[in-house]
Amino acid sequence: MNAQNKSDRTGCLESSSAGRSSPPSETQRAWRLILLGAPGVGKGTQGELLSHGLGICHLSTGDLFRAAGSRKEDEQTPAMVEAMKYMRNGDLVPDSTVWELVREQADSLRSQEGFLLDGFPRTLAQAEHLKLFLDDEKLSLSAVVDYEMPQSEIVFRLSGRRICEKCKAVFHVTWRPPKIGGVCDDCGGRLYQRNDDNPASIAVRLEAYKHGTAPLIQFYKDLGLLTPVDAIGSSEEVFARTMAALQARA
Ligand code: AP5
């Protein structure tokens, strides 16, 4: 497998049957998953593999914000313009803006095929909003996968990440380099570095993770949903480990 992350992660409805040709039968399980883990741990990479492997839709709030940010200025709400500033600095976007964005995807969350949330929830308030929503809909989460990795590897992964501006494939200058520097192997698009993948923003994001997101680990542990997975190794190894952990829960 070469570059990954090419399907749309900004809405589930179109890509929801990516790996499965028909809706789940009674014996097939509709997985409802959350991916937790520090920035750069590989949530997007694994989210893509899992969504194809399990036939569920992949919703990334980071991608939703980036897609909203690339709209024309007159199509952006003031909340979205504000959100872009937070993202650039590496800070978390305010909960109210995030929930507004996620609410727009309510139909995706109700999908009978299940879903995979990448980058949401990120605070206790967001987790509580989501729980209330799912409780109201009489839906329950299957598992919360928590990817674990030392900080030195995180900085290596983030500072070398490059993304295709056309097809959104993800490369890494050392680990998964393109055949021609700066050019996407698949579509020939230009590769760029995310504006929050710089040392100052990475430091802020890691801090925001420690204070805002790490408390979610206890929240989901108390609900009996936490599924820790070691994120070191190739993406195929991490994927196999994740599938084994999910099968063990099932
Ligand atoms: P978001 O887009 O969610 O970014 P993030 O959590 O910082 O995570 P990343 O996308 O940086 O990393 P990843 O774990 O997906 O890693 P990837 O697979 O790409 O959020 C960005 C911002 O949006 C936030 O800072 C915040 O401002 C805002 N935001 C979003 N959601 C929010 C919310 N709910 N509340 C508030 N604010 C919110 O991999 C990274 C690199 O490593 C790649 O180059 C990849 O090729 C490489 N790699 C992957 N796997 C491996 C492997 N096994 N071995 C070696 N290299 C690997």
Image (cartoon, rainbow, N blue to C red):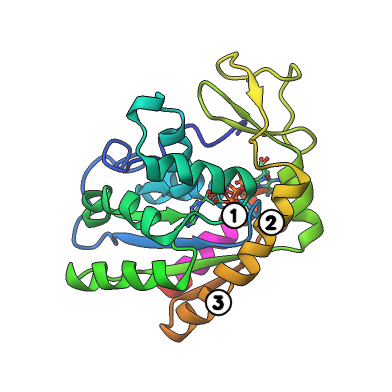
Instruction: Find the distance from the CA under tag 3 to the CA under tag 2.
Output: 17 Å
Q: Residue furthest bottom?
A: 222
Residue type indicated by callout 2: Val
> In the rendered image, which residue does mark 3 sit on?
215
Which one is nearer the viewer's eye here, 199 or 168? 199
Residue type indicated by callout 1: Asp
Instruction: Find the distance from the CA under tag 1 to the CA under tag 3.
Output: 17 Å
Query: Marks 2 and 1: CB-CB under 8 Å?
Result: yes
Q: Secondary structure at mark 2?
A: helix
Q: Earlier in the sequence, mark 3 or mark 2?
A: 2
Up-down: is 8 above or below 235? Answer: above
Would you say 73 lies left or right of 173 here? left
Q: How far across and how far down the image is residue 214, in percent?
A: 59, 72
Of badges 3 and 2, the one in the foreground is 2
- Magenta range is 240-247
* Residue positioned 33% across, 52% down in the render: 102
Would you say 141 lies left or right of 157 here? left
* Residue positioned 74% across, 29% down in the render: 177
> In the rendered image, which residue does mark 1 sit on?
91
> In the rendered image, which residue does mark 2 sit on?
204
* Residue 105 visible in the current orientation: yes
- Residue 188 falls in image quadrant: top right
Q: Secondary structure at mark 1?
A: loop
* Residue positioned 41% across, 35% down in the render: 68
Residue type indicated by callout 3: Pro
At label 3, counting other C-alpha atoms closer than 10 Å, the crowd grade (few under 14, some 14-19, many 20 or more) is some
Q: Is mark 1 within 8 Å of ligand 1?
A: yes
Q: Earlier in the sequence, mark 2 or mark 1?
A: 1
At label 2, counting other C-alpha atoms closer than 10 Å, the crowd grade (few under 14, some 14-19, many 20 or more) is some
Which image quarter holds the C terminus? bottom left
The numbered dot on residue 143 is none
* Residue 233 visible in the current orientation: no
